[in-house]
Image (tube, rainbow, N blue to C red):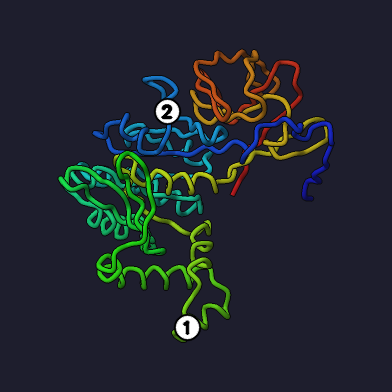
Amino acid sequence: MAATIRRDMTMLPSSDAPSGHPHVLMYVITSETSDLAQVYANIGANPATNDSPFATFAKFPNVVAIVHRPSQADHRILDSCDAFVASLDGAAGVDPKIMEFWSLARDATLPRHILAFNVVNGRADFDELCAISSRVLEPDLLVRYLPIDSDDELSLTGVYDILTSEIHALIDGKWITKAADPEHIAITSSAREDLFDQLAYLVLDDLTLENHTSGLPISVTKLETAWSHPDVVTITPIDDGVGASTFDNWLSGLNPVWVPVLTIADNTYEAFETRERVGISITQSLARMWGPNEDLKLVQKISGEVSPVIVIEANQVAILSNNLTPGATLSTENSVAVLVAPTF
């Protein structure tokens, strides 16, 4: 018999709960040789400490990224995340472990995003990374933004938006948006038609799609709305601050995917509905957490046994510790809460 979910108003989030989507954990895997400081800068995040795998976002306080190299990748972490990002280094190519984890994320239908950096000075430029990504990661990869090199061709200065035919560029230290030159529009017309077709078949209603296939024009506004569809997977050039706002738009649309069931007494909730600090161990050193990020004495509970949790590092979404037991509930000692991982 299916469990009955009852809503006890005393357990629902308070009005002063943190705003935004609650508790999103994103897994980022980059190459073994990538400069991690560059990776953090590219995604607009700050590492919690010099040797911490956690990265936090000033704009998105409820989103936390775990940044790993392929040698650190753990499928248990991916299994408990809400999104996956492949950070591809033009100087290093695509590691087989990134390919493996991308396939797992695609099978789990997690939101996914590909970031391309070192596309000017690396061995592979943006076009080559797009071709590789389409071949070994995402056959239906959509490309909307193209990188624009600086005059000295040593860095990026902006991106060209194929969908809107606009240029977003850094000029005299300020980001500006301007209409593309006719030359840009002409040389990208084929790519624009391909993008229109891909978006049309992905998300447009039957009537609009029929009009499109009949040769009638489609509203660009409709296609921009279509771009936010969760099934859209894209690759973003992300060097030198370029592409950061595009990635921010993707981050802002993330929602919790992996949500354990929280049981308190006879009541059942989704984990993010709790008012108390609770969590569930993922690996021997990582636990996902929900509720207020308070400095509390936590314990893990396994079959009635209680043992203290020594917190090494904590944030709103996860903690690092030692000697955790995967699957165990973390809470304060007097709590009766139990978390059970979701199954898909």
Image coords of residue 234 (percent x, y): 40, 55
Drawn side of residue 8 relative to residue 133, left or right: right
Tell me which residue sits at (45%, 50%) in the image.
112
- Is any part of residue 119 visible from this angle? yes
Drawn side of residue 319 relative to residue 39, left or right: right
- Is any part of residue 326 visible from this angle? no
Dot 2, crowdedness within 10 Å: few (<14), some or many (≥20)? Answer: some
**Figure check: 78 above or below 142:** above
Q: Please name the residue that numbered disc 1 is placed on.
A: 216
Tell me which residue sits at (26%, 56%) in the image.
132
**Figure check: 160 above or below 254:** below
Of callouts 2 and 1, which one flags the residue occurring earlier in the amino acid sequence? 2
What is the three-letter code of the residue carrying label 2?
Asn
What is the three-letter code of the residue carrying label 1?
Leu
Q: Please name the residue that numbered disc 2 is placed on.
A: 46
**Figure check: 64 above or below 91:** above
* Residue furthest front as drawn: 172
Image coords of residue 202 (percent x, y): 49, 68
What's the mark number on residue 234?
none
Secondary structure beneath label 2: strand
Within the image, what quadrant is residue 33 found in? top left
Q: Which of these two is toward me, 217 or 40?
A: 217
